[in-house]
Image: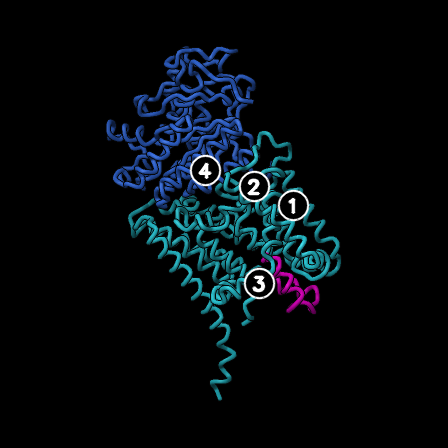
Chain colours: A blue, B cyan
Amino acid sequence: MGFGMARKTTGGSARAGALAALVCLAPLAHAQDAPSSVAPLAGSGASAPTAMVAPPLSASCDVPASDLAGPIALPNFTAALQKRETVTILAIGSSSTAGTGSSNTAKTYPSQLEAILEKTLKGEDVIIINRGLPGEVAQSTAERIKSEVALKKPDLVLWQTGTNDALARVPASDFAATVRSTVQWLKDNQTDVALVGLQYAPRLARDSNYAEIRDALKRVAAEENVLYVSRYDAMRFIAQTRANLHLMAQDGFHLNDLGYQCMAEHVAHALIVSLFMKKVRPAAN
Amino acid sequence: MRAPNEIDFWRGFALVTIFINHIPGLYFERFTFRNVSLSDSAELFVFLAGVALRKLVEGPVAGLKPGAIVFRLEGRALNVYVAQTVITEVAIALLAAASLLLDAPFMIDWHNASAVFNQPVEAHIGLVLLTHQLGYFNILPLYVVLMFVAPLIALTHRYAPAALAPASFAIYAFALISGINFPTWPVEGTWFFNPLSWQFIYCLGFILGGADGLGGFARRHRQSLRRLAIPIVAAGAVLALMNFSPSPISVPQPKLLFMFDKTFLSPARLVHSLALTALFAGAFATIERWSPAGGKFLSLLGRNSLNVFCAASLLSLICQIVRFVYGGHVATDALIVILGLTVMGLVAWASEWRARLPADRPARAR
């Protein structure tokens, strides 16, 4: 392990930050005081009905399930949770992963997600490594994914991507090819991956390239049968139904603390729903 | 100005490739050699930098005392450092200007620039310390580190030549085995080009650039090495076309040794790059016969590589902004490449024209 290599969001001030994030998530935490805290996949179980185990979304971030993600099995991540008390997630992507627009590192989506997952998966130590690099296109991230996976051996990769490819006018077919080959590489290497899509920003809603990249990502996820978190639909739903809520920072493009809270909740929801799918395939390794 | 030569030619070639590869989505990117290769122009560029250092050490600074060598080479390092900090600042200003003019706040986010605007206190320290690097502006920081250690390489070569290759290899192996890399800050991560790894190909360029030792051996066995290189280059092309890279799960520890990792310059990339060098070393004479203008143009770029590199880096960023505004089409992409090559040529020509000016002055005075 190199010096300054991992931005480990557990421990020390980050832990305090995670707790702070939990305070922010009061509605969520409160809801979990009920029997919904989940013992992670006891034994060969994993057969609990989805609706009971998925962490409820807070009032601000609530969206219909159809606007979020369809459950897809995460066999390797599930196996890791069954076998170990510590699981590692690599959160990689661009500014939405790095947390541009948030007030501090505890408010980034990976930090908030870590808190939610630890709260939900009682007894599990969830380590999320944040490798967000603002403004990066998928092709560069794809190179980093391979290095990071080799070095850190994560149980799950959360790849937030697409926005910068759309803005750099990368052809959707090239973008799709990059994502597809990387997803296949991750699958070949027994590493689960969830694709976290582009954000909704009113300014970009009419940008045809933006829509093409968004659709391409969704299509690759469907073809490769990997989890896809439709951030765009979720954010658009919130923007259209709760106009007084502001998920965006002042630049109208990056997320603010509430935006990152919703992003973390949405990703957490998609993951948990997928983890507790009725039939979980055994891990390939 | 020196006549077109092999090193300048391939440096020019690497510069053009880097320019094209640094515009994501550009149609013509598919024709660059990294699509059929495990290594890319970065390896070539750093290897040739090592060769250039050898030429300098055996040429202009050969007779200098150790102190003077240090002084002279650190001056070059300082030049590169200044170039890096200036082009990074210009890039930041370009993104800021684009974000204002196009009313596109996300522009200041591109290539990891956002920390400069969101964490200015930390980012400005990082910019000066080279721990904050913009995407695509991350090869010169490696070059700065290599230049700063160049006197050490030159003096080791002078006083203990046999120690240079083993010492450089030991650092390379240490980085591969330990996974240690330089940290970035304030955006936490690591350098895209790990200097501990990449110094090895720089030193190999330095060593193979000489006519004695390993360089002499390579020259004496050029034909055999070329024959050895053919299957390696062919295998690299097949693997690249298949998009194959080893499984980090199944390869044994230390994993970086078996991966095709660019940051740590995994052995597969290094060997492939050396094989490419062996295969194409000496090809310049043929290329020049076949296309004298092409040979002359790329050599012109290569002779002025730092200026051309800086211009090309900024130009590729400008082209990215242009593509954002006007979209990416084959025709406009062709225009971008033609414009890019023209500007790179003009910068190289202007650099040499400027260098010639003082020599002309006495003539005009007469």
Residue B39, image x, y percentages: 55, 47
**C-alpha span from label 1 to label 2:** 13 Å
Span colored in magenta: B48-73
- The amino acid beneath tag 3 is Glu
Is residue B70 shown in magenta?
A: yes
Question: At x 61% / y 35%, what residue is drawn?
Answer: B255
**C-alpha span from label 3 to label 1:** 27 Å
The verdict on a common chain for dots 4 and 3 is no
Q: Earlier in the sequence, mark 3 or mark 2?
A: 3
Res. A273 image quadrant = top left
Say if mark 4 contacts mark 3, CB within 8 Å.
no
Q: Chain of mark 2?
A: B
- The amino acid beneath tag 1 is Tyr
Q: Which residue is mark 2?
A: B261
Closest to the camera, between mark 3 and mark 2, is 3
Question: Crowding at label 2, few (<14), some or many (≥20) Cα neighbours within 10 Å?
Answer: many
Relative to A253, is A80 on the left or the right? Answer: right
Question: At x 44% / y 58%, what residue is drawn?
Answer: B312
- The amino acid beneath tag 4 is Gly
**C-alpha span from label 2 to label 4:** 19 Å
**C-alpha span from label 3 to label 2:** 28 Å
Q: Earlier in the sequence, mark 3 or mark 1?
A: 3
Say if mark 2 contacts mark 4, CB within 8 Å.
no
